[in-house]
Image: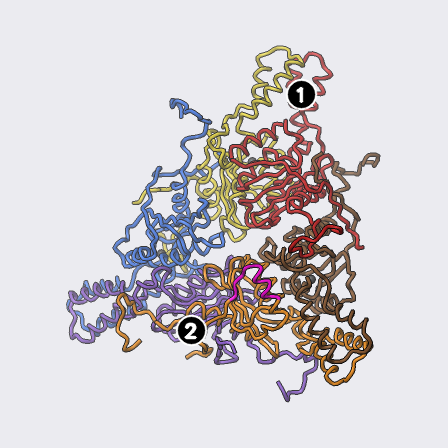
Chain colours: A red, B yellow, C blue, D purple, E orange, F brown
Amino acid sequence: MAGKPAQPNDNGARKDFMEPEDYFMAAAVLSARRSRDPSTQVGACIVNQDKKVVAVGYNKMPNGCEDHMPWSRSKGEDAAAAVWANGGDLTVATAAKVAAAAAETKLDTKYIYVCHAVLNAIMDKNSADVKGCSIYVTLFPSNECAKLIIEAGMKEVVYLCDKYHGSLETQAAKRMFKQAKIPCREFLPKETEVVLKLKST
Amino acid sequence: MAGKPAQPNDNGARKDFMEPEDYFMAAAVLSARRSRDPSTQVGACIVNQDKKVVAVGYNKMPNGCEDHMPWSRSKGEDAAAAVWANGGDLTVATAAKVAAAAAETKLDTKYIYVCHAVLNAIMDKNSADVKGCSIYVTLFPSNECAKLIIEAGMKEVVYLCDKYHGSLETQAAKRMFKQAKIPCREFLPKETEVVLKLKST
Amino acid sequence: MAGKPAQPNDNGARKDFMEPEDYFMAAAVLSARRSRDPSTQVGACIVNQDKKVVAVGYNKMPNGCEDHMPWSRSKGEDAAAAVWANGGDLTVATAAKVAAAAAETKLDTKYIYVCHAVLNAIMDKNSADVKGCSIYVTLFPSNECAKLIIEAGMKEVVYLCDKYHGSLETQAAKRMFKQAKIPCREFLPKETEVVLKLKST
Amino acid sequence: MAGKPAQPNDNGARKDFMEPEDYFMAAAVLSARRSRDPSTQVGACIVNQDKKVVAVGYNKMPNGCEDHMPWSRSKGEDAAAAVWANGGDLTVATAAKVAAAAAETKLDTKYIYVCHAVLNAIMDKNSADVKGCSIYVTLFPSNECAKLIIEAGMKEVVYLCDKYHGSLETQAAKRMFKQAKIPCREFLPKETEVVLKLKST
Amino acid sequence: MAGKPAQPNDNGARKDFMEPEDYFMAAAVLSARRSRDPSTQVGACIVNQDKKVVAVGYNKMPNGCEDHMPWSRSKGEDAAAAVWANGGDLTVATAAKVAAAAAETKLDTKYIYVCHAVLNAIMDKNSADVKGCSIYVTLFPSNECAKLIIEAGMKEVVYLCDKYHGSLETQAAKRMFKQAKIPCREFLPKETEVVLKLKST
Amino acid sequence: MAGKPAQPNDNGARKDFMEPEDYFMAAAVLSARRSRDPSTQVGACIVNQDKKVVAVGYNKMPNGCEDHMPWSRSKGEDAAAAVWANGGDLTVATAAKVAAAAAETKLDTKYIYVCHAVLNAIMDKNSADVKGCSIYVTLFPSNECAKLIIEAGMKEVVYLCDKYHGSLETQAAKRMFKQAKIPCREFLPKETEVVLKLKST
Ligand SMILES: [Zn+2]
Ligand SMILES: [Zn+2]
Ligand SMILES: [Zn+2]
Ligand SMILES: [Zn+2]
Ligand SMILES: [Zn+2]
Ligand SMILES: [Zn+2]
């Protein structure tokens, strides 16, 4: 602020405080840091119409299942793909075996157990409901999360990253948001990095 | 009651009133009747520790999507299976085509959009939370519903039917309920049919 | 649905799902089934402005009094009427005796103890309040229930049956609803009977 | 306090502050002052387990009916009694006429319309429920109020006055409180009169 | 009412019931009576938009501190003033000593510990929030109370007395209320004294 | 994790997720960043017994006063000190002038208007109350904040910094916490710095 001539009605307030939008996304990013997912940590932050945070969440295993459910990503589809890639021709009998193996394998991947950040935020909210709220997410919501956002009556989705835009889950989510007339917009930060000191100075 | 000798302390009360357990499952069955799913109507009823119903739900498309999302069940897997059944040998190239077709097809089935009864009940509840509640369901919960039940802190699942016990979704749900130490029990009705007259007599 | 040509934009949804109004009254009728009243089982269902059920109720003895309070209907007035019917002339002294007997008898009838369905629904509600709600009742509310409905700020009464329209209680209720500008309408069902199966198929 | 030797640990606090019990009953008495009942103004005050007032109430006509419902006390019974007192013998025909007149008259008395203080307090409460609360009333509750107190799950009744102890309503109330194991105790004030100045000094 | 000709539509209601505004301020005055402050007992009463009391409060020591914190009013400033009044010239060294003594003394006065009536009312409220409420206070709020009233989103202040209008605290409060556009008005009672009998008659 | 031999029962979870305590204090530090106070940004985070964040807050001017109230720190005491430092002897008359000037000046400092982080957190909470909660603060609470923490029934204070431990406000706060038996403990971080990226990668 030094060197800047005082404005009319300048009351001496700090000019470099964090803006609400940045704060909400930062709260989602901070929440993501709690996730034990070895590949992608995702965070969500729900904000009501009075601009108050009413919930945060991150991707996690269901309560009580933290130490037992697998975090493995190797989908049966990948297994099958590998077989196909190695093999030449594939008989119907082989294909059936691959499918069975894939189904069995799925029970040992994270995908079938993990609670996404949006689910966690909605289930952990402190307000009676989240109707009319905005949700800030570090990753575009999946179809499962989109259902929850729509059924909860939220009015807006703000996302930091949409790297899986080609996936089935993202495409289905977008189709539902469009039908339910819930606008989705990309987050545009004022600050691109926030450093928090947790040590007394 | 006529002809039945009076009990000691008999205060003249009706003896054939509906028992609470029957009532809770009947409420789930009644709620299921609201579903537009052409194949299976599923219902759920959440009951708190004071034995009050705090939520009911049924399987449905997300709000605003009722008239647009497909209720078709034809999974890509089925399509693929059909191809395999017809064909003899299957080259890797063919298999890849089948997989792509399957993925595209999935966007046109109900599975990726439908909100299950448990999800609907939890999102429509009238209490602040459903911690410590029991849930009565007409069909054993899927893995997606199990996540919600566990994260919500419910303490018991009572189910009417478990016909998909062999499915991946049901197996994964049972694995999570076991880890989270949430008991699941089959419903044993006192009455097997309830007839409700909606006409003034 | 078979034989019915597909509509434009037909998404394959079931057409014979239960309509909301039918569902609300069916919920009241189902709740009535829990009553131990040997003569008339009455039910009520309170629905908020988002079309969610926030409470149900039925006529019952107060909590803790279920096994002790009498369900007898023989009003002192009836006793007196019987005396008069038998007798010829009635002296003032006799009339006084009849009145005293009637008063004593009243303490042994259900009327002075029973909690009506509306009272039970309001006291058992799961929402903070029932302001602006509609109430679905299987029997037109009595004056005691009308007071509660009005004081609770409900906005509409939907009734299945009005068989006691000539009674003092019903007349007084109607007078109050009129003053308080709360519309009362008779229920017109789409379906006249609902059968619920409580057995796994 | 002047002239009184300081106590050990005396922190200079005022000694003549109002005790909680006196305050709760005074709040009931103050609330009673709002009643438009020309004969008896009754008040109630509901106190939760943290000793906070969660509701007050007074006897009143239902909302919207204040200017139209009669406050007359002349019961049909009184009318009948008058006839009997005047008359000598009473034929059955005459008795029937008296009964009919009485019924008609009842529609013009306050008894059938008035909301008692307990009802008003419960319906106007600011907490989600009044479970486990105590209720302070200026007059022993009637049977209608007893039902509400019991169904609401309150745990204690404290009353200032029990002048209608011989009435049917009070007797029925006591019978219910006894069955529901809700203790009723007479209020014993520390101060017998409280004067409130509403003028700035 | 005697001697007063009946009005058209007169339903016999009492005419001398207490008006809402008088009731709200009387509730604040009654609450003030609970204070142990030896000099000034202050009361507050918060009323929501439905004209229901949602909180009352009075000035008090924090919970658990009632018997230990001092109620003394002798401010360090007073001590210093006394020194100055006695002394002639005051050297800088003396002034420093006086200031130090004053700071130490402050730890033994009530001012630094006491919870004002507004703080107590807001912290003890029974509603989820007090947004849009009016607050009735027996004394114009201090700056600390003004912050709470504004942050709570209340919409109006009604005060009985403004005897410290010249103080720093009151001036700062008025400046904030003006900026926050919260109107403050003096209370004009209909009745100037209310007598409450706490004894059964 | 690479290179670390798998633990028995290792389910592949990330080991470097953020611990709850670090998360709560980081949330307080993040919230502090919203403050417009030019000298010290303070943050607070309230956590309930289920380890959910129910409120956050930072130091700010009351709503509606943000652009008008002064953020100046120059206390009247400082002004006076300056006078004394410059002067030699100080007459009573001079001292009186200094005191008056100081009082006037106080109306132009932030101290009399600013809402501390604890106040802001408590007033902005999303839960019905904060009874039994812990509060994480970046700076040891002042006496004004201590009153709020105690009256709200919180059970623990965790602070990052106590740099004003010698001040009157901090000393008074500690005296109250001790009487109210509310433990205060210094925060010991696992991580000392958290970097949040607000840009999609
Ligand atoms: Zn998701
Ligand atoms: Zn499911
Ligand atoms: Zn009734
Ligand atoms: Zn009563
Ligand atoms: Zn104050
Ligand atoms: Zn502070």
Q: Which residues are magenta?
A: E172-184
Label 2 sits on a secondary structure element that is loop
Q: Is residue C170 left or right of residue C27?
A: left
Q: Secondary structure at mark 1?
A: helix
**Is E174 placed left or right of F42 in the picture?**
left
Badge number at residue E146: none
In this view, the mark in front (2 or 1) = 2
Residue at the (54%, 67%) spot, across then down: E56
Left or right: D61 as drawn, with respect to A7: left
Mark number, residue E190: 2
Residue E25 vs A83, above or below: the answer is: below
From the image, give the main secondary structure of the stretch colored magenta: helix
Front residue of C166/E190: it is: E190
Q: Chain of mark 2?
A: E
Judge whether residue E180 is colored magenta: yes
- Chain for disc number 1: A
Question: In the picture, residue B33 is in which quadrant?
Answer: top left
User: Horizontal placement of B1 versus F40: left or right?
Assistant: left
Q: Position of residue A183 (x, y in %)?
A: 56, 36
Callout 2, which amino acid?
Lys
> For mark 2, does the 10 Å Cα neighbourhood hold few (<14), some (14 to 19), or many (20 or more) residues?
few
Q: Nearer the viewer, residue C145 or D92?
A: C145
Q: How many marks do you count on the picture?
A: 2
The residue that appears at 64% across and 89% down in the rendered structure is D3
Q: Residue furthest right?
A: F3
**x, y (%) of residue D52?**
55, 66
Mark 1: which amino acid? Answer: Val
Q: Which residue is mark 1?
A: A98
Q: Is residue B10 visible?
A: no
